[in-house]
Image: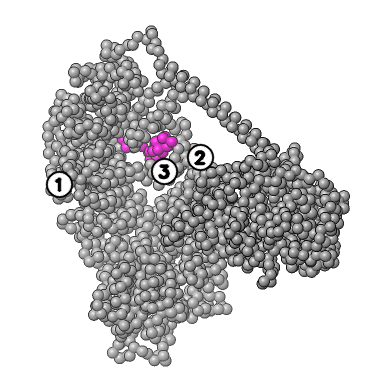
């Protein structure tokens, strides 16, 4: 309101103005509109209000010049539209198309939510540099380490074209670099040498326009002025509004406080709004329920509001003047921690307007003025970087922060940064996008914005750390875009002192120096740290440390740190704050009472700090010796100040000033620090020591030559000139205490301290973190060896470990007992081996070599997957660019083969030479494993039985550490070696067995001795034979004594090696004590004899097993043969079918039993789509045999995936849903059960459902389902089990059979009952085979019903249930009400469908040399199932025709023959008015198999020819449609003339009975040509033959033996015709009877009305191999064009969580609120499943990167078909590597779907979990 008041003085003008007085100047009009809007709109902000605000803004912005922004035709914007979208739609001045290429202009594409971004580690300078999909794909990153991720929210921009972001130019063709930009940056970089300023610096005010921009447009000066003024006004409006907004969502406690809230409302009207703010804690349903309860909105409105809270970040849920009610509601909501504010409606309205203004500004950054895309952004930038207009008038004064303290001239952008927390999600994201678009304008713009951001960074940090409720949209993350650019970082560190201020923030935050939500800037006098305080508990400090790390990581800043001592001085002060925090003291007597988890937050803080320490330390690579020495001295001084308690850092109650005491060891006295780790306080955290360690690693600068330049003789001089020996001992004592404490914890001496102490130890030594702390402490100890006399250091270590007495030979005086003692010795030796043998830091190993070393050691113990490997290597190495390249060098990648594999890396053989089993990163167990592997390898190589692994020489040639090997000569070390062996031998002798840890101690001691002999052979050999210890023995003596001792046999080869080495130098020292055994009489080779005997025994057992196997398989084969021969003889004996899986008894005819099966609704079978030419082309290229596997490329990752993915097809090549056929599919799991057991089992399932009422059970009782108790497959029926009939092939020739059949029909009496049982429509189908036939049921319900009828009932119940629910999916005509035969026709819709599905599933798989019926997938269980289904049909007929002798078979058989013989269909004797060719001939074949299997062989021939004729009719229809849009190549040659003969003649003779049809057929034949028609006929009729073969083989296997065709390359069609005994079409001229039958059928069809219509009534089946939708080979290509490819058809948006249906390729919104059904019960996937797969769904869930299987309201996730480059599954793309499709997994999904395995997959998953189901439990 303020600006309005300043225009018109309040006293003279009433606020409501007369409309006539509306000002004319556009800007004044805008002001007027915005000021009067709240009251005129009654404070309700609607979409119309938004449109009005926008139009006022645009009008004021362009004044009379709208034609410069829009094409002339429409010089005003449509309502609700934004300028950039209109410009793009009308492609105004090149908008909407790709930007022109301008050298030096960066890409700056701002990512929208859900878009894919790429990161190339090899090219990028750091992790923050990303590429958009377009730039990535147009630049070359082959063999680079690329990761890919999806933008979680809008913001962030593509760094392509920004010189500073890349290590090497990525040469993207769209964004070439330009020299003038390079020059600008170099100018800023020159500041490195200047001294940094601490004083406040003003920021340059004018930023020149971007130079060298070729698309400038001449602008009228007054337009420029208008644009500037409008934008300035808009920005001021936002700031004036936000002045009054609260920083946090808090609710005043009572009305008075509410009324006192600052408000800009001049009327102070009591109209209040209540607003809910977004957070991550509450679910949609919770909020919706709450809104309904509080405001009384209905559920729909409430859910729209909830969605808006989630999208926009907040929503007004109610506006009214009933203050008490509003406050009460608000307090209710704050109770469940929802963010709520209650404010005046006026202010809230203005905030909504401000939100629209921000949106408008964002739109302007995307718009252009003519062809100039920069000018508007430049104006916005200029206004953002100008000060606000002075504001004189406030109604009730808001709290306005005073920015002048931080900046001489605060600008609008500073206010926006500070006020960022006052905004909510959507405007925040918009603002960040505006800033990002300005950053890319030019380098000076970037510097200016960074300067402003840096100036008020402390306020941003305050808000982020203490106030902000939506941290992820905080402006603090903007730092990432600024601090990572080297020139920017340098500028803000040197000019704005940002580093020092950041360090202050950290110190003051953790010392809890905080007042009313602000971190104070002055340093507190008393820096007390309380690890329990809120700052430690907060997780938000991490990004502040990352900011610091980003700053320090830039090379120019590193140079500053190294050259200016202020930085290290300041940093040392920060580190000392965290020195020794959270110390531990051993609890000796009773277990600690209260275990806190404070240590977790402390570790989080110190590890974050130590990552910065690493970077700070590395910076000194740029230092000269003086600077480095200065830094080291500074750090050491600070350490001593802390450790000697002269500074007030440590808690005086826990720490005391270190005192020295004298100890005796060997022949000398030593002055060392006095401390007992068992009784004192020890902390894990010594940040200053870690910093010192990193400084000492610059050994090149610390070499003698370079230190001599500054007058020091070396490192020892550097330490001992300013400090005395006691000081240095004090310095190293602190890390040493930690090492001793670790040893004690590992030895089990601290168990009473509980879990926290174990947790700290695990963290401290964790593979990924150890280089930040543990390795640093060890390095300090190692460095001390070259500063002081090594003997003192070794004695100090022994003293700290409490092992002085042990190594003096006074074991009984030791503070430890038993096993603890030897564990401590083992730990001590481990430390010694490490500090003497670890050479990485001592030689400054190059980082790549260090990585190589780590990988080699991690893989030495065996192959490992990438993820496991990454866990064993420090995080810094895994993040390094060269990690994966080094990994490729040293290992082989084994790609995953099967569906459950992951890829693994195996070490190459030559890399084993680099393995050192005593490397300090191995645990003892790992070391022993690796030793075994290395020894085996050496044994193979050298043939030596017990090879010795000799330590590698240290090879430290230069630098301060070159004197390290001389430590191996020290006397203290020799004494340690002696007593380690001596005491172990003594303890072993006294106990009789080796004590625990003895082996490890000897291993380690021998390793040390061998290392000494490798490094210092002559000196060490000499002292080992002359220096006596206990009982006057020398080291060499005790080793000689062990040589031939049986107890120490494992060490024999090592002892040999040692003694041989010593004797080279001091031969006389070893000869006397060394025993030479008498080798003349070789000892009997006991071992060898034992081994040979064992081998002989083993061979005998193997031979016996082999013989048993052979006899078993022979018996088995014989049995089978006997079975077949003795079928007739053994009829009185009961043949067994296996055992019942419930009662384990034999299954035989004595007691009814059946096979467990599942009948499920299915929409698997496909009809040939007649609308797409691609399907016809597919037929032309189909292989000739579907029972031979086609070769598939199974390499992983797939070769040339990028090229293959370039073509994207609509709906991922999914199969259109409307061309599927519905039916019932039966499957069996192969397990059988007695009928009685089945009934008992079913009742137990019902019982379980009753007792676990809330559980989501795997099976549904309503659907009569159960789970097979053995294999957990889903089932709902019990099928009868029969042996196949063994009738041989009949010898009657076909013509004779037809004649005989005709005569027998004539002879039989007319059967009126039978006629009544056939459909009235004249199809010849039988009513009793319908699923819902009312005649069924009377016979079954009788109590004495036979068992087989009860089994039949399970089948009928399931079929009827499906049939009743799916009338709409069936195309068959239903009989009228009251007639029989309603529902699905079982022979066709169940048996026919099942066999067809089996045939489809077997397409493209190998049938092991025979025909499809021999294939492995059609096992005995499936043929048993087919017989069971047919038996059920037979049983149904028998129930219907109860009284007839053979169960009515004969009558049904006669009816089938009548139906088939054409003379019967035309006469008046029968009612077959329906042409036979309109029925599926396969169904007739099934009917025959059910009642008269003996005539299958002959009926089959008739059915095949009926099928041929039918196919011709169907083809005419399909091809006639296709004629219009299919283009053909030249006619091809015929291939199958031997099968089909004269195709044209057959084709024409089928259609000749109908003139219309004949004409169409001629056109079609001429258009396509004979060869193509023949190929199609082949393809369309092959499935019939395959199905017939499966059916016949199951029923009468002996009638149809597989013929021996010899060559397996004969095509499948010929093999099938031969097997089934069908004369080929080429032979038709010789088959009179067949010709008669055919002409009869065709005439009947031709004269029926079906032929005259063009839809002919014949639908062809889809003949090719079934596939699922084709996803791209590389997962990220799915996101590349996601707006085109993945669009939900229901809500027409790109889903945030897309699920792609793999059956038809449609994209659905998964688990989202936008596409639910009316009741909000089902989401879109479930709704789509009903339209597509029927009961089942298979989806690929893109974001979650996994599969979703659905089956009738239940579902489960399955593993993704995509694996990353390392062959691992990456759920939810967390790791973000590019993922490729894995052929075996992909095939597995197709197989699961084809074999109808989804219901079982879902059931098995549900069976294994016990929960209530639904999304919530996932």
Is 23 one of the magenta-colored residues?
no
Mark 3 neighbour density, 10 Å: few (under 14) some (14–19) many (20 or more): few
Disc nearer the start of the sequence (1/3): 1
Residue 289 is situated, as x and y percent measured from the top left of the image, at 39, 71
Determine whether, in the image, residue 1680 is placed left or right of residue 873: right
Residue at 35% in and 27% down: 951
Q: Are marks 1 and 3 in contact (CB under 8 Å)?
A: no
Task: Residue 1548: name its quadrant.
Answer: bottom right
Task: Residue 263: name its quadrant.
Answer: bottom left
Of helix, strand and loop, which one carries label 3? Answer: helix
Question: Is residue 566 shown to the viewer in this render?
Answer: no
Is 859 one of the magenta-colored residues?
yes
Distance between the alpha carbons at the discs numbered 3 and 2: 15 Å
Residue beneath disc 3: 868
Residue at 17% in and 33% down: 815
Disc nearer the start of the sequence (3/2): 3
**Residue stretch rendered in magenta on the structure:** 839-862
Determine whether, in the image, residue 847 is placed left or right of residue 1033: right
Residue 702 is situated, as x and y percent measured from the top left of the image, at 28, 37
Residue beneath disc 1: 654
Residue 1006 is situated, as x and y percent measured from the top left of the image, at 30, 25
Residue at 43% in and 17% down: 1088
Note whether 151 is above or below 959 in the view shown: below
Depth check, front residue: 832 or 1100: 1100
Depth check, front residue: 70 or 211: 70
Residue beneath disc 2: 894
Disc nearer the start of the sequence (1/2): 1
Determine whether, in the image, residue 1641 is placed left or right of residue 680: right
Determine whether, in the image, residue 1749 is placed left or right of residue 1464: left
Residue 174 is situated, as x and y percent measured from the top left of the image, at 53, 57
Depth check, front residue: 1588 or 1731: 1588
């Amino acid at each position: 309101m303020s600006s309005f008041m300043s225009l018109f003085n309040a006293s003279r003008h009433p606020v409501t103005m007369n409309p006539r007085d509306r000002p004319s100047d556009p800007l004044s009009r805008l002001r007027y509109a915005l000021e009067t809007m709240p009251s005129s709109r009654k404070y309700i902000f609607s979409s119309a209000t938004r449109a009005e605000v926008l139009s006022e803004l645009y009008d004021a912005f362009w004044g009379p010049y709208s034609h410069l922004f829009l094409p002339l035709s429409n010089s005003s914007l449509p309502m609700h539209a934004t300028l950039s979208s209109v410009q793009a739609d009308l492609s105004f001045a090149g908008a909407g198309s790709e930007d022109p290429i301008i050298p030096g202009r960066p890409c700056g594409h701002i990512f929208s939510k859900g878009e894919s971004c790429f990161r190339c580690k090899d090219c990028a300078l750091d992790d923050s540099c990303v590429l958009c999909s377009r730039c990535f794909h147009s630049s070359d990153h082959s063999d680079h380490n690329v990761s890919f991720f999806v933008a979680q929210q809008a913001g962030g921009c593509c760094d392509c074209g920004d010189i500073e972001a890349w290590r090497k130019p990525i040469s993207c063709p769209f964004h070439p670099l330009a020299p003038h930009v390079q020059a600008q940056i170099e100018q800023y970089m020159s500041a490195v040498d200047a001294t940094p300023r601490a004083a406040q610096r003003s920021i340059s005010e004018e930023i020149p326009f971007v130079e060298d921009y070729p698309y400038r447009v001449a602008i009228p000066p007054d337009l420029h002025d208008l644009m500037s003024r409008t934008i300035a006004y808009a920005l001021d409006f936002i700031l004036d509004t936000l002045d009054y907004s609260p920083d946090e969502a808090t609710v005043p406690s009572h009305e008075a406080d509410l009324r006192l809230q600052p408000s800009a409302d001049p009327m102070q009207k009591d109209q209040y709004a209540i607003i809910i703010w977004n957070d991550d804690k509450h679910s949609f349903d919770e909020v919706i329920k709450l809104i309904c309860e509080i405001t009384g909105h209905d559920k729909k409105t409430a859910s729209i509001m909830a969605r808006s809270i989630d999208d926009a970040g907040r929503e007004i849920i109610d506006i009214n003047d009933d203050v008490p009610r509003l406050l009460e509601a608000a307090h209710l909501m704050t109770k469940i921690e929802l963010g709520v504010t209650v404010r005046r409606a006026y202010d809230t309205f203005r905030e909504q307007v401000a939100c629209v203004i921000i949106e408008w500004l964002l739109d302007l950054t995307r718009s252009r003025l003519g062809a100039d895309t920069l000018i508007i952004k430049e104006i916005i930038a200029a206004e953002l970087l100008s000060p606000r207009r002075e504001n004189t008038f406030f109604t009730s004064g808001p709290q306005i922060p005073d920015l002048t303290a931080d900046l001489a001239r605060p600008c609008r952008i500073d206010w926006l940064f500070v006020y960022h927390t006052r905004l909510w999600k959507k405007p925040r994201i918009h603002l960040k996008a505006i800033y990002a678009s300005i950053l890319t304008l030019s380098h000076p713009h970037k510097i200016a914005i960074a300067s402003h951001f840096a100036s008020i960074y402390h306020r941003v940090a305050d808000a982020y750390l203490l106030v902000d409720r939506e941290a992820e949209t905080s402006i603090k993350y903007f730092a990432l875009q600024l601090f990572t650019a080297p020139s920017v970082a340098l500028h803000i560190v040197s000019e704005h002192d940002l580093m020092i201020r950041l360090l202050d923030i950290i110190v003051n935050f953790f010392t809890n120096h905080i007042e009313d939500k602000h971190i104070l800037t002055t340093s507190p006098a008393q820096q007390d740290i309380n690890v329990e305080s809120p700052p430690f508990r907060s997780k938000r400090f991490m990004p502040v440390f990352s900011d610091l790390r980003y700053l320090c990581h830039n090379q120019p800043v590193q140079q500053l740190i190294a050259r200016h001592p202020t930085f290290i001085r300041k940093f040392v002060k920060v580190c000392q704050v965290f020195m020794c925090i959270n110390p531990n003291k051993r609890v000796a007597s009773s277990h600690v009472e209260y275990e806190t988890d404070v240590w977790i937050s402390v570790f989080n803080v110190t590890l974050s700090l130590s990552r910065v320490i690493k970077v700070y330390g590395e910076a000194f690579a740029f230092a000269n010796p003086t600077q480095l020495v200065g830094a080291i001295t500074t750090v050491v001084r600070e350490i001593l100040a802390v450790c000697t308690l002269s500074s007030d850092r440590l808690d005086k109650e826990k720490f005391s000033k270190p005192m020295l005491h004298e100890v005796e060891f060997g022949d000398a006295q030593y002055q060392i620090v006095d401390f007992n780790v068992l009784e004192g306080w020890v902390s894990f955290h010594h940040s200053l020591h870690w910093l010192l360690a990193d400084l000492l690693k610059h050994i090149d600068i610390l070499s003698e030559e370079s230190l001599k330049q500054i007058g020091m003789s070396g490192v020892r001089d550097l330490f001992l000139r300013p400090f005395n020996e006691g000081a240095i001992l004090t310095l190293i004592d602190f890390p040493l205490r930690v090492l001793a404490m670790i040893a004690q914890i590992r030895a089990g001496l601290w168990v009473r301290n509980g879990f926290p102490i174990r947790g700290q130890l695990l963290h401290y030594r964790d593979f990924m973190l150890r280089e930040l702390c543990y390795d640093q402490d060890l390095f300090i100890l190692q460095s001390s060896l070259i500063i002081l006399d090594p003997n003192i250091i070794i004695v100090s270590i022994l003293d700290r470990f409490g092992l002085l007495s042990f190594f003096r030979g006074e074991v009984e005086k030791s503070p430890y007992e038993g096993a603890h003692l030897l564990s401590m010795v083992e730990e001590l030796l481990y430390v010694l081996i490490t500090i003497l043998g670890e050479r990485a830091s001592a030689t400054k190993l190059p980082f790549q070599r260090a990585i190589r070393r780590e990988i080699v050691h991690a893989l030495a113990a065996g192959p490992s997957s990438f993820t496991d490997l990454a866990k064993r290597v420090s995080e810094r190495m895994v993040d390094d660019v060269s990690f994966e390249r080094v990994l490729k060098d040293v290992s082989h990648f084994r790609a995953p083969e099967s569906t459950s594999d992951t890829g693994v890396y195996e070490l190459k053989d030559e890399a084993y030479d680099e393995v050192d089993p005593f490397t300090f990163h191995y645990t003892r167990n790992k070391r022993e494993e690796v030793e075994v592997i290395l020894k085996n390898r050496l044994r193979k190589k050298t043939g030596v039985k017990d090879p010795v692994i000799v330590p590698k020489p240290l090879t430290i040639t230069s630098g301060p550490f070159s004197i390290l090997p001389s430590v191996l000569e020290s006397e203290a070390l020799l004494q340690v070696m002696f007593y380690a062996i001596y005491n172990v031998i003594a303890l072993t002798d006294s106990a009789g067995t080796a004590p625990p840890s003895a082996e490890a101690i000897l291993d380690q001691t021998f390793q040390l001795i061998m290392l000494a002999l490798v490094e210092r052979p002559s000196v060490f050999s000499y002292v080992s034979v002359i220096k006596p210890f206990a009982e006057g023995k020398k080291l060499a003596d005790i080793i000689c004594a062990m040589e031939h001792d049986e107890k120490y046999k494992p060490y024999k080869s090592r002892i040999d090696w040692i003694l041989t080495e010593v004797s080279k130098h001091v031969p006389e020292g070893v000869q006397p004590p060394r025993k030479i055994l008498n080798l003349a009489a070789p000892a009997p080779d006991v071992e060898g004899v034992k081994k040979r005997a064992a081998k002989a025994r083993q061979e005998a057992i193997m031979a016996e097993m082999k013989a048993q196997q052979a006899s078993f398989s022979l018996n088995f084969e014989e049995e089978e043969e006997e079975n077949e021969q003795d079928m007739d003889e053994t009829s009185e004996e009961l043949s067994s079918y296996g055992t019942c899986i419930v009662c384990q008894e034999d299954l035989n005819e004595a007691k009814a039993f059946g096979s467990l099966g599942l009948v499920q609704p299915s929409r698997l079978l496909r009809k040939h789509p007649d609308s797409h030419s691609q399907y016809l082309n597919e037929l032309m290229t189909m292989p000739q045999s579907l029972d031979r596997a086609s070769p598939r490329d199974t390499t992983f990752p797939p070769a040339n995936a990028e090229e293959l993915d370039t073509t994207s097809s609509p709906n991922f090549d999914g199969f259109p849903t409307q061309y599927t056929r519905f039916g019932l599919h039966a499957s069996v799991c192969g397990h059988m059960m007695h009928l009685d057991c089945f009934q008992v089992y079913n009742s137990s399932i019902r019982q379980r459902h009753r007792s676990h009422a809330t559980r989501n059970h795997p099976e549904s009782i309503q659907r009569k389902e159960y789970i097979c108790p053995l294999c957990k497959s889903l089932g709902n029926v019990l099928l009868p089990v029969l042996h196949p009939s063994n009738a041989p092939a009949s010898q009657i020739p076909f013509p004779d059979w037809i004649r005989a059949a005709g005569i027998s029909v004539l002879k039989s009496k007319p059967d009126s009952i039978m006629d009544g049982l056939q459909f009235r429509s004249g199809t010849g189908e039988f009513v009793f085979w319908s699923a819902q036939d009312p005649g069924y049921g009377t016979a079954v319900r009788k109590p004495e019903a036979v068992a087989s009828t009860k089994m039949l009932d399970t089948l009928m119940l399931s079929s009827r249930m499906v049939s009743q629910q799916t009338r709409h999916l069936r195309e068959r005509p239903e009989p009228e009400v009251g007639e029989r035969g309603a529902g699905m026709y079982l022979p066709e819709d169940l048996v026919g469908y099942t066999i067809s599905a089996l045939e489809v599933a077997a397409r493209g798989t190998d049938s092991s040399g025979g025909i499809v019926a021999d294939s492995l997938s059609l096992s005995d269980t499936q043929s048993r199932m087919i017989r069971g289904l047919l038996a059920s049909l037979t049983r149904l007929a028998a129930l219907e025709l109860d009284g007839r002798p053979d169960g009515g078979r004969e009558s049904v058989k006669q009816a089938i023959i009548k139906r088939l013989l054409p003379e019967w269909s035309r006469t008046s004797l029968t009612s077959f008015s329906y042409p036979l060719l309109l029925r599926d001939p396969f169904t007739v074949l099934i009917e025959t198999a059910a009642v008269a299997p003996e005539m299958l062989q002959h009926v089959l021939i008739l059915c095949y020819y009926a099928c041929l004729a039918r196919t011709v009719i169907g083809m005419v229809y399909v091809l006639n449609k296709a004629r219009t849009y299919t283009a053909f190549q030249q006619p091809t040659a015929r291939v199958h003339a031997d099968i089909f003969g004269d195709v044209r003649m057959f084709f024409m003779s089928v259609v000749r009975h109908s003139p219309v049809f004949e004409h169409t057929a001629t056109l079609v034949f001429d258009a396509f040509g004979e060869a193509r028609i023949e190929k199609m006929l082949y393809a369309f009729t092959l499935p019939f033959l395959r199905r017939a073969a499966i059916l016949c083989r199951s029923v009468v296997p002996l009638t149809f033996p597989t013929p021996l065709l010899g060559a397996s390359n004969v095509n499948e069609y010929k093999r099938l015709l031969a097997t089934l005994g069908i004369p080929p079409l080429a032979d038709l001229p010789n088959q009179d009877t067949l010709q008669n039958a055919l002409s009869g059928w065709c005439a009947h069809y031709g004269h029926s009305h079906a032929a005259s219509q063009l839809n002919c009534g014949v639908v062809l089946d889809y003949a090719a191999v079934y596939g699922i939708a084709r996803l791209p080979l590389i997962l990220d290509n799915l996101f590349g064009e996601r707006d085109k490819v993945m669009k939900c058809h229901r809500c027409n948006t790109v889903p945030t969580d897309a699920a792609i249906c793999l059956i038809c390729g449609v994209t659905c919104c998964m688990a989202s609120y936008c596409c639910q059904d009316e009741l909000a019960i089902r989401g879109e996937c479930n709704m789509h499943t009903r339209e597509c797969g029927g009961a089942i769904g298979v989806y690929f869930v893109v974001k979650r990167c996994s599969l979703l299987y659905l089956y009738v309201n239940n579902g489960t996730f399955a593993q993704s078909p995509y694996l990353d480059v390392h062959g691992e599954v990456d759920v939810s793309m967390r790791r973000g590597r590019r993922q490729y499709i894995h052929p075996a997994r992909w095939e597995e999904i197709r197989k699961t779907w084809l074999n109808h395995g989804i219901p079982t997959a879902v059931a098995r998953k549900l069976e294994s979990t016990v929960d209530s189901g639904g999304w919530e439990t996932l």
